[in-house]
Image (cartoon, coloured by chain):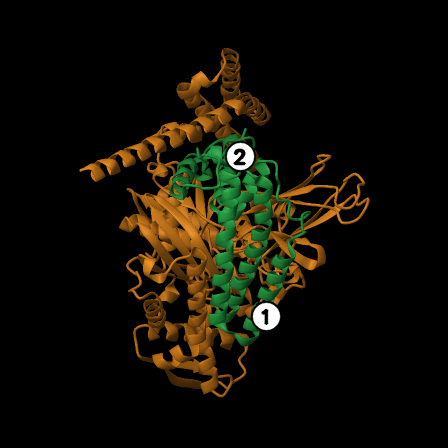
């Protein structure tokens, strides 16, 4: 628990209890779950020993969701009910996607978000992802022998607000407590850096099934700081499959394929691509619409020629990321390759040539993200070693609001470290204007129409004033998950408005609550038990924190405050035993109020101490430098 | 308590434009090690909120102090000469003339896809940025003339916007 950790790292209310926490890589083509065991991260296998779970879900008429290998292998039999690469649909509306992405499915008519009609009814990408996550949760609970305290879920660094929110919703729906969303390249850097005791500047080149991310990180003494990030959420291994598929279609004289045949050809294309990583040429056999078969050969050189523009796109982003970080390729200590698609020799050769060094590939590129997520989950759950590592990540996309003439005023620039809060003042442009519409957008372009619209809200009740006299302060706050909250306040009157940004095409809170409720098997008792459990956990956390705070920083309290806190603690301890949810919550709120000022003072003190400790270090450095000079 | 602490005081630094950047980096990490929300993942809701506020404040402070133009604007405001670029749009004629000239050059560069000319223009803009920053330092740390510094900052804001445009042009050239 927290305030304790400030002064006395490593102690916890029950130091010997290991908390079960996992890291999950929810990937486009496959997903993994990992945990830290005996101090080292490991991916957890299924009953047959496989750590990869194909991110493929088949919906059956009896309502069953079949996830994994079987669903993947059977996708050609039942293409409309078998959802593949669902990650590409997360937080997206049908208009955001290329038409062929949805070609196999029955898409419901909803302009705000993708909804698919299956044999098991209408489903959303959030539900499909939740079905995948649930399988991984069960796997972890079976292997680790009990309920999880929480999970760290990874997302591409280039995921925008809507895609992140959708991922978090999916985890919640799968019954997972999300400790944190972290960026995939950052997770990979964490796994790699800790494993190799790496220091200096590193680039993570992460080419997944459907997304490409590139991060430049500075690693120093357990601090993993993202300096710059670039990426493309619509570029991945799937696109390389597409290149082979195009070659195959060309050779067979562009036959018209139905959706079953399309899936079969696509699977053949993927197998061919994978085989070409170790063979110079690969032959394939695919079924034709007339019942016959087509067979042909693809050479690695042919494949590399058609895929070259894709590789070039990644290299452009690599150069741009280095420029953003103000780093020359020679200053980079290493390039870590992540994602199954980086097994392709052309990727390795391109990175080698561009960076002038051999890329690092010794950690399994399929597993490294999940392993890093497990390390972070272990730390966040409060297990030993939690204070050894600090992740400082950034937002990959700028956040701003619409101003006059459809222009964007960026309030939080991309590559800002999170969490982050920033304000900017705006004014009214008409005399007597009493309301201001605030349109929140994400993206780098100058015109609103070229950026992604996140939310609109209105600040009302501004007193009539001359144009330009009102001062409206708009504050953007991004939390450690990279999620945004926007508030606005008119400064001369104090009128406020606030929104938690939920993109309009996503699911709203009520829909999520409904889905959660539907997923409870024993709705009422279950919910009551869960609420009681949550209230008690919160009460215990606060009691433990206060107890240790009293032990170490009691001198910050007046005798009167001291006595009041003691009373409130006793009351909460009693309430916690009572099993009465309302009473526990009230007593928790009372102790929170009683200790607000104390907590703030302790935070100040911890900062002052840290800075003082640093001053001492600096003096020691100076002294030793002078000694060296003298000698 | 958070909002009343100056960005400089938060990191234990003297309140001057000239800044010890390595010391800022170290102080920022020392503070984040104490307040980052990851340190409070299992804490009470209040402590999580407090950590989020402090960490955000420390990041905002770092972002402001690290960046010379933002640092200058912050100091000007603290010394009673807010930059307030929205309201103070009047700029010297020769400055505006040069801006127009640069913009025309950029249009030509875009049309011709001339990467070398883009680099040359960028270098020219950066040189002026450097000399204006030196003027800011003189005005703030030596002459104690915040109004004069604020005028320089207004010009610097123009320059930084233009540099962003140059970067975008460069991106466009790179992905051709």
Circles 1 and 2 on the same chain: yes
Residue toward you, B102 or A321: B102
Chain for numbered disc 2: B
Q: Quadrant of residue A435?
A: top right
Q: Position of residue B16 (x, y in %)?
A: 48, 38
Which residue is at 50% across, 12% downward?
A563
Q: Earlier in the sequence, mark 1 or mark 2?
A: 2
Q: Colour of chain B?
A: green
Which of the two marks, 1 or 2, is nearer to us in this view? 1
Which residue is at 37% across, 54% downward?
A188
Q: Colour of chain A?
A: orange
Residue contact between numbered discs 1 and 2, judged by CB atoms under 8 Å? no
Describe the element under mark 2 as helix, strand or loop.
helix
Q: Position of residue A262 (x, y in %)?
A: 50, 76
Residue holding disc 1: B107
Residue holding disc 2: B49
Q: Decide: few, some or many residues near mark 1? Use Cα within 10 Å; few <14, some 14-19, many ≥20.
A: few
Question: Image height check: is A21 above or below A583?
Answer: below
Relative side of A627 to A386, left or right:
left
Chain for numbered disc 1: B
Q: Position of residue A595 (x, y in %)?
A: 52, 22
Which residue is at 50% across, 68% downward?
B118
Instruction: Give the distance between the C-alpha atoms of the residues marked 1 and 2, in whole angstroms.
Output: 48 Å
- Indicate the quadrant containing the N terminus of chain B: top left, top right, bottom left or bottom right: top right
Question: Image height check: is A533 above or below B130?
Answer: above
Describe the element under mark 1 as helix, strand or loop.
helix
Residue toward you, A10 or A404: A404
């Amino acid at each position: 628990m927290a305030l304790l950790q400030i002064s006395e790292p490593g102690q916890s209310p029950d130091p010997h209890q290991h908390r079960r926490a996992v890291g999950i890589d929810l990937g486009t083509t496959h997903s993994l779950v990992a945990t830290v065991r005996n101090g080292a991260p490991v991916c957890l296998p299924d009953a047959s020993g496989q750590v990869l779970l194909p991110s493929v879900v088949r919906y059956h008429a009896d309502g069953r969701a079949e996830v994994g290998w079987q669903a993947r292998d059977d996708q050609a039999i039942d293409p409309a009910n078998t959802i593949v690469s669902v990650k590409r649909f997360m937080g997206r509306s049908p208009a955001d996607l290329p038409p062929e992405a949805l070609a196999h499915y029955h898409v419901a008519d909803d302009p705000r978000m993708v909804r698919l009609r299956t044999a098991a009814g209408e489903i959303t990408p959030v539900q499909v992802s939740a079905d995948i996550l649930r399988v991984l949760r069960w796997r972890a609970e079976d292997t680790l022998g009990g309920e999880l305290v929480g999970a760290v879920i990874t997302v591409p660094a280039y995921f925008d607000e809507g895609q992140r929110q959708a991922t978090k919703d999916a985890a919640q729906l799968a019954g997972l407590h999300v400790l944190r969303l972290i960026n995939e390249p950052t997770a990979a850097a964490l796994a790699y850096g800790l494993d190799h005791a790496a220091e200096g500047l590193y680039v993570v080149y992460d080419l997944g099934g459907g997304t490409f991310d590139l991060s430049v990180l500075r690693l120093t003494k357990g601090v993993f700081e993202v300096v710059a990030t670039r990426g493309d959420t619509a570029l991945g291994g799937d696109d390389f499959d597409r290149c082979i598929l195009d070659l195959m279609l060309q050779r067979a004289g562009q036959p018209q394929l139905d959706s079953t045949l399309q899936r079969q050809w696509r699977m053949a294309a993927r197998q061919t691509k994978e085989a070409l990583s170790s063979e110079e040429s690969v032959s394939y056999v695919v079924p034709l619409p007339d019942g016959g078969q087509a067979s042909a050969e693809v050479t690695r050189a042919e494949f590399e020629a058609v895929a070259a523009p894709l590789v070039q796109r990644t290299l452009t982003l690599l150069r741009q990321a280095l420029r953003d970080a103000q780093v020359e390729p020679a200053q980079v200590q290493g390039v870590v390759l992540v994602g199954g698609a980086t097994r392709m020799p052309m990727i390795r050769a391109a990175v080698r040539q561009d960076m002038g060094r051999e890329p690092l590939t010794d950690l399994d590129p399929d597993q490294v993200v999940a392993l890093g997520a497990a390390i972070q989950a272990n730390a966040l759950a409060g297990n030993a070693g939690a204070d050894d590592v600090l992740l400082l990540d950034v937002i990959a996309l700028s956040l701003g609001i619409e101003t006059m003439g459809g222009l964007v005023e960026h309030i939080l620039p991309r590559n800002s470290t999170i969490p982050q809060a920033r304000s900017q003042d705006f004014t009214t442009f008409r005399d007597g204007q009493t309301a201001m519409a605030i349109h929140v957008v994400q993206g780098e372009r100058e015109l609103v129409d070229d950026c992604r619209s996140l939310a609109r809200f209105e600040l009302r009740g501004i007193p009539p004033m001359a144009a330009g006299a009102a001062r409206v302060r708009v504050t953007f706050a991004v939390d450690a998950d990279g999620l945004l909250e926007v508030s606005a306040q008119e400064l001369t009157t104090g009128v406020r408005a606030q929104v938690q940004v939920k993109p309009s095409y996503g699911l709203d809170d009520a829909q999520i609550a409904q889905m959660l409720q539907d997923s409870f098997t024993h709705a009422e008792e279950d919910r009551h038990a869960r609420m009681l459990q949550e209230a008690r956990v919160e009460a215990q956390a606060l009691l433990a924190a206060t107890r240790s705070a009293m032990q170490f920083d009691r001198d910050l309290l007046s005798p009167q405050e001291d006595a009041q806190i003691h009373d409130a603690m006793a009351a909460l301890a009693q309430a916690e035993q009572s099993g009465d949810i309302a009473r526990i919550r009230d007593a928790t709120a009372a102790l929170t109020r009683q200790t607000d000022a104390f907590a703030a003072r302790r935070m100040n003190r911890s900062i002052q101490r840290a800075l003082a400790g640093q001053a001492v270090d600096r003096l020691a450095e100076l002294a030793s430098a002078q000694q060296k000079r003298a000698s | 308590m958070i909002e009343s602490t100056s960005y400089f005081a938060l990191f234990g630094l003297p309140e001057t434009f000239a800044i010890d950047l390595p010391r800022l980096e170290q102080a920022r990490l020392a503070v984040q090690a104490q307040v980052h929300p990851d340190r409070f993942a299992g804490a009470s809701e209040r402590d999580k909120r407090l950590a989020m506020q402090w960490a955000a404040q420390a990041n905002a402070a770092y972002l402001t102090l690290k960046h010379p133009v933002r640092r200058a604007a912050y100091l000007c405001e603290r010394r009673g000469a807010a930059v307030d670029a929205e309201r103070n749009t009047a700029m010297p004629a020769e400055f505006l003339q040069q801006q127009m000239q640069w913009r025309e050059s950029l249009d030509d560069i875009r049309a011709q896809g001339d990467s070398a000319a883009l680099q040359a223009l960028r270098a020219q803009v950066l040189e002026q940025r450097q000399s204006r920053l030196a003027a800011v330092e003189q005005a703030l740390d030596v002459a104690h003339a915040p109004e004069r510094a604020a005028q320089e900052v207004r010009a610097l804001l123009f320059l930084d916007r233009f540099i962003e445009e140059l970067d975008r042009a460069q991106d466009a050239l790179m992905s051709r």
